[in-house]
Amino acid sequence: MSKKINIAFILPSLKPAGAERIMSFLAQNIDKNTFDTTLIITGIKTENDYSNISSKLIYLNTNRVSRSIPKLIKYLKNDKQDIVVSSIIHLNLVVGFLSFIIKKTKFVARESSVISKNNTEINIKNKLSSHLVKIVYNHFDKIICQSNDMKTDLTKMYNIKKEKLIIINNPITKSIKISPQKKTNKKKLNLITVGRLGSVKGYNRLIKILSKIEFDFNYTIIGSGDKESLFEEINKYGLKNKITHIPFTDNVYKYLQESDLFLQGSYVEGFPNALLESCVAGTPAIAFNVPGGTKEIIDHGINGYLVEDEDDFLLHLNNFNKSNFNAEEVAESVIKKFNKQKIIKQYESLFLDILK
């Protein structure tokens, strides 16, 4: 092609969360000889939690996605983007409706959850909301699913045409130094979970399980959200002195490297970046086998354990010995599948294909 392909990546904010990180990473790292990228944020500039964004960055400065619609329409009509990519369901629904108005642009949605299992962003179990997904999502030129479960959910629950769906896993966005191989101190394990504090993340069952283990531990929780409910559960089981809560840190990787084991209690996941990063750091994990991308990351016995219920989780936790895992093998198990060069190439191929 004689000119670059213009792509606008649209997000509600640049807060430190999975979709925001992946979309901004893509905007900055796809081939600049082929693509000219713009990152459009519907929210307020002062809410930016990422610095050093190298792509063209535009803030619409609205406090709700729905209020950004007039500005989005004006921008997309004037700026003549070849492709528009959005992520997160409530924004996808808005951008999907814009695709009915702006005809010459290709529209791509990146789904971030197994929608029918996750009603944290909108009341997706509401009949109207489900009907909107069926209509709007089928009008996208392509929908990126982070996992096989997402694709299955969209086809079976929302009748999305299979030819519109493509699976592209999340990339490893940062090189992480592998944690040094060390002998496990079974007398006191260093455990960690990274993720927002919400019911879907399953902290309630993790705390319950930890109250039953047969050895001493330190448990670090990194994430913001409903701290009050979390500590009600912690106090209920008398674990306050064993748990450290860190609302936010720029140095998550340091904590992952220093931990013996990552715990994931989620009831549903999109494609869990924190779990992926733990493996990249050489720290194995125990995670529930739930809808989403967890099962595509965990290679049972190689980089952790995939368990079916709380009893199974407790059994693997009580019998855990980090010396059974090789840090380099834990890291390599995910690097070979989710390295950034591989995933970015998949995105670039998708963008080129939909313009043919």
Image (cartoon, grey):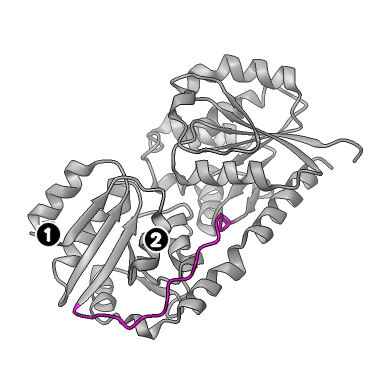
Q: Position of residue 289 (x, y in %)?
A: 39, 65
Q: Position of residue 181 (x, y in %)?
A: 41, 80
Looking at the rendering, in which quadrant would you find the C terminus?
Answer: top right
Say whether residue 81 is left or right of residue 20.
right
State which mark lies toward you, 2 or 1: 2
The residue type indicated by label 1 comes to Asn
Taking the image as drawn, is residue 291 in sight?
no
Which quadrant of the view contains residue 305? bottom left
Residue plotted at (61% across, 62% down): 339
Q: Position of residue 231 (x, y in %)?
A: 15, 48
Q: Position of residue 318 (x, y in %)?
A: 23, 78
User: Which of the two labelled residues, at mark 2 and mark 1, occupies the earlier sequence position?
Assistant: 1
Look at the numbered disc 1 and give the secondary structure of its residue: helix
Q: Which residue is mark 2?
A: 254
Say whether residue 14 is left or right of residue 100.
left
Residue plotted at (33% across, 68% down): 259
Look at the numbered disc 2 and give the secondary structure of its residue: helix
The residue type indicated by label 2 comes to Lys
Q: Is residue 170 magenta?
A: yes
Magenta: main secondary structure equals loop
Q: Residues within 10 Å of mark 2 (few under 14, many from 20)?
A: some
Q: Which residue is mark 1?
A: 241
For the residue pair 327 and 209, the one nearer the viewer reads as 327
Taking the image as drawn, is residue 276 in sight?
yes
Vertical position of residue 136 compared to residue 160: above or below: above
Say whether residue 45 is left or right of residue 103.
left
Q: Which residues are magenta?
A: 169-187
Which quadrant of the view contains residue 314? bottom left
Looking at the rendering, in which quadrant would you find the N terminus?
Answer: top right
